[in-house]
Image (cartoon, rainbow, N blue to C red):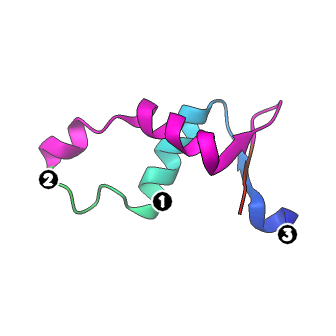
Amino acid sequence: AFVDCYHGQYDSKLDFTYELVDEIGLLNNSQEIAARYFDYEAFARDLFLSDYTMTKGGYVFSYN
């Protein structure tokens, strides 16, 4: 279960979010104008409210 929940070490929640958005292709089908205005900071806040946690040292884990 630990291995499934571990997502890596990051300098910040925002760095993790940039990588996640790219990895899952969240904005791949968006028009360039929409992707330009995507609020990564707000999305990071939402992710870390219920789906992810970051421990001391920048280690990111998911709750599921």
Left or right side of 53 for 35: left
Q: Give how far across and how far down residue 52 sits, in percent.
A: 66, 48
Q: Residues within 10 Å of mark 1 (few under 14, many from 20)?
A: few
Q: Is residue 17 magenta?
A: no
Left or right side of 41 for 50: right
Kindly identify which residue carries mark 1.
Answer: 23
| Residue for point 51% across, 40% down | 46
**Distance CA(mark 3)–CA(mark 2):** 37 Å
| First to last magenta residue range | 32-59
Mark carried by residue 1: 3
Kindly identify which residue carries mark 2.
Answer: 31
| Residue for point 60% across, 34% down | 13
Rendered image quadrant of residue 47 = top right
Rendered image quadrant of residue 2 = bottom right
Looking at marks 3 and 2 on the same chain, the residue that comes earlier in the sequence is marked by: 3
Q: What's under tag 3, amino acid-wise?
A: Ala
Where, quadrant-wise, is the N terminus in this rendering? Answer: bottom right
Q: What's under tag 2, amino acid-wise?
A: Gln
**Distance CA(mark 2)–CA(mark 1):** 18 Å
Q: Nearer the viewer, mark 1 or mark 3?
A: 3
| Residue for point 48% across, 59% down | 23
| Residue for point 44% across, 52% down | 21
